[in-house]
Amino acid sequence: MTIITANIWYFVGSFVFIVFGVLIFLYIGKDEQVKELTGLITKLKKSFNDLDEQAKLIVKTDLELNKAQEELDKRLNGLDALQNTSQLISTSLNENEIFAKLDQTFLMDIGFEKTLILKYDKNNILYDRSEIGFTPQEKAAILEYLANDSELINLLKRGKKISSENSTKLQKETIARIFNVEHYILTPIMSPNGMIGIIFVGNTAETSSMTEGDEEIISILATQIAQALDNARLFEEVYRSRQALESKVQSRTIQLESALEQVQNISKTKSEFISAVSHELRTPLTSIKGYASILMAGKLGEVPENVKLRLAKINTHSDNLVNLINELLDISRIESGRVEMKFNECDISRMIESVHDLLTPQLKDKRINWVTELAPNVPKLFLDTSHFERVFINLVSNAIKFTPEEGTISITASLNDDIVTVGVSDTGIGISEQDIKRLFDEFYRVENKINQNVKGTGLGLALAKKIVEAHKGRIWITSEIGKGTTFHFTIPV
């Protein structure tokens, strides 16, 4: 019994031990699972927290993107409105027309609830030119406020933009109350001469605050308005100047016409006087020359040699006076149109050769070389031969007078576009620019040593000019001091 009982207790003890061991094993395994599950729960909790943070970030990003999209849409709408406005006002050259185009439709398109555009008048007082969202009483209060707030105006005059984001607390409260807005921008309209106006835009408390994009749009609008107003002002000034200039030109034209008429009358009177005096001088001069010739011929008795010398001088001076009178008569007749030009076909080369033969003694006296270069295509011309020959005689004689011994006188002629251009050149002392301007004036003579020793009337070149112009040509001079002079003139074919 005792052995059985002992065995039983041994078996029971063994069983209990085994069961206890199994229980301990099972407990140990379950604890590991619990730990594993606890770790998984911790990881899941952490992942859930991470997902929550990401969800919050996504929602925040989405809100910011929506806000940015709204801001971008607003800016794009504003820029589109600015572009349309720029095209409208840039073509306007009238101030009233410019502000008429800044209508309420445009002011609403730029995206602000309230807008007010002010401009200074001639008395430097602000007045409204365009607005949206303000009553007449509000505008009157605003204008009074701006007229008294010199600090704000001075900031604007220096080009500073005032907004609800950069204003002082007191300034913001005052502007918000006067303009009845929560968010606002005040931008000056600047021209090269300073501030000419102000742009105000504002929104109520329910809308978002002003951004840099809003300030940029309003700055662009202010610049466009300033440029349009400057263009209109400049156009007005140019238009007024043009009217004043036209008035002055018209007045001066009338004065010049009157003066020209007086000059023409004086010139006509002068020509008539010269013609009359020349005719009156011819009769006694002819008698003087005739009596001198009779006395020199001895028809009234023997004349002493010393008397003959003086009679010869009388005869020479009489010839000079005859030439002077003839030149004066020719000039006055040409000016008055009383000379009838007798045009005949003329070979200019023969005319030049005839002048050469006539002046050969003077050329030989000074051993001057004579050169002619006439282009073979120069045709025959229709000229008044007797008058035009005097042109060559006067020009060549003038060249001989101012060309030193063993110098050269050359005559050229060329054809270009149905115009024959003739040049009479010398290697003489040359003419200054100042003298060239007056050389064709009647009685004008260059002050130099040669003219002091050689007498002349100062009418030869004036007569040559009249004859060339009577043939529808023109005459001019090129010269270089110490190297020579060339007289050019043209003859239409």
Image (tube, rainbow, N blue to C red):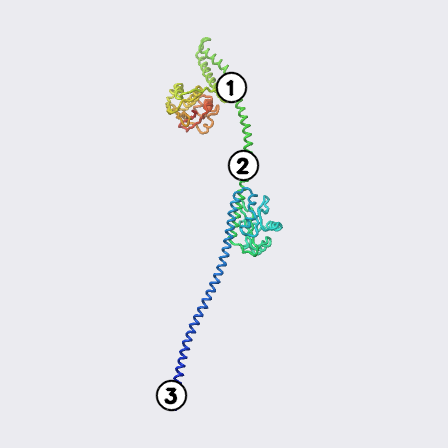
In three-dimensional space, the C-alpha distance between marks 1 and 3, rounded to whole angstroms, equals: 185 Å
Name the residue type under label 1.
Ser
Viewer-proximal residue among 433 and 414: 414
Q: Earlier in the sequence, mark 1 or mark 2?
A: 2
Horizontal arrangement in the rendering, residue 92 relative to residue 316 (left or right) = right
Mark 1 or mark 3: which is in front?
A: 3
Quadrant of the image containing the C terminus: top left
Quadrant of the image containing the N terminus: bottom left
Q: Is residue 315 above or below residue 156?
A: above
Q: Which residue matches tag 1?
A: 275
x, y (%) of residue 234?
A: 53, 41
Q: Secondary structure at mark 2?
A: helix
Q: Which residue matches tag 3?
A: 7
Q: Earlier in the sequence, mark 3 or mark 2?
A: 3
In three-dimensional space, the C-alpha distance between marks 3 and 2, rounded to whole angstroms, equals: 141 Å
Name the residue type under label 2.
Arg
Q: Secondary structure at mark 1?
A: helix
Horizontal arrangement in the rendering, residue 414 relative to residue 324 (left or right) = left
The quarter of the displayed image where residue 35 is located: bottom left
Q: Which residue matches tag 2?
A: 242
Name the residue type under label 3.
Asn
In three-dimensional space, the C-alpha distance between marks 1 and 2, rounded to whole angstroms, equals: 47 Å
The quarter of the displayed image where residue 353 is located: top left
Residue visible at 59% across and 44% down in the picture = 123
Mark 1 or mark 2: which is in front?
A: 2
At label 1, counting other C-alpha atoms closer than 10 Å, the crowd grade (few under 14, some 14-19, many 20 or more) is many
Question: Does residue 407 appear anywhere in the picture?
Answer: no
